[in-house]
Image: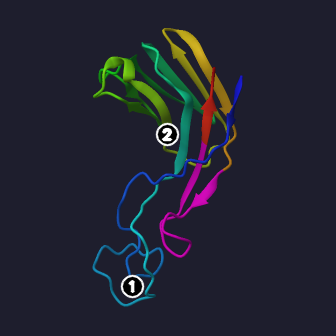
Amino acid sequence: MNRFSVALSLLPLVLSPACRPGESPGSDKDSAPGIGTGLDCGGIACEDGFNGAFAPAFTVHGAYVFTADIDGAVSTCAGSLPLGGDFACDGELQLTRSGSALPDDEHSLPSFLIYQAGFSTLNLTVTRDGVEEASWSESPEWELYQPNGADCGPTCTVAGATLSWP
């Protein structure tokens, strides 16, 4: 069994207003800036969750099934390489697909996201054409992430890892 080698991937997923000049930290206002603290907060948003990268990315053509057991709740993603729009995911697990506009031999599955925070155990298994390619087990170390600084919202709970396999 391979272990996760921890490498935090704390990348913001979406851009949106979070705290505007003149607003109080954590304000949910959507109106124009007003009189307030004078903070110059950025507009970067974040989402709670786990961000994982495969090292190397999955590139061999075939039918893949990714199964994540997240504290006993199972989520799957299934589809094929080369990419043809046939990947389907259920639950909290989502795959990143890369190269769909490139030639078939450049398609890959480089990473995944789990849109859930605070879970204690993740078991992830990958099969290709019904044969296990890799599996990992991890207990994430959750951290608070504030992309606009400590005095500005939002605050997200995140963890991440690089999953190495042969």
Q: Earlier in the sequence, mark 1 or mark 2?
A: 1
Q: Is residue 105 above or below residue 46?
A: above
Q: Is residue 116 visible?
A: yes
Q: Which residue position is annotated with label 2?
A: 113
User: What residue is drawn where x is 46% and y is 57%?
Assistant: 46
Residue 143 at x, y percent in the picture: 63, 56
* Callout 2 secondary element: strand
Is there CB contact under 8 Å for labels 1 and 2?
Answer: no
Q: Is residue 145 above or below residue 128?
A: below
Q: Is residue 66 magenta?
A: no
Residue at the outermost bottom position: 35
Answer few, some or many: residues within 10 Å of disc 1's Cα (few below 14, many 20 plus, some between 14 and 19).
some
User: What numbered label is drawn on residue 11?
Assistant: none
Q: Quadrant of residue 22?
A: bottom left
What's under tag 1, amino acid-wise?
Answer: Gly
Q: Nearer the viewer, residue 156 or 164?
A: 164
Q: CA distance from mark 1 to mark 2?
A: 34 Å
User: What residue is drawn where x is 54% and y is 36%?
Assistant: 53
Location of the N terminus by quadrant is top right
Q: Is residue 155 left or right of residue 138?
A: left
Question: Over which residues does the magenta segment extend?
Answer: 142-160
Q: Quadrant of residue 157?
A: bottom right
Q: Which residue position is annotated with label 1?
A: 22
User: What residue is drawn where x is 37% and y is 77%?
Assistant: 20
Residue 132 at x, y percent in the picture: 59, 13
What's under tag 2, amino acid-wise?
Answer: Leu
Q: Is residue 143 magenta?
A: yes
State how the image is colored: rainbow
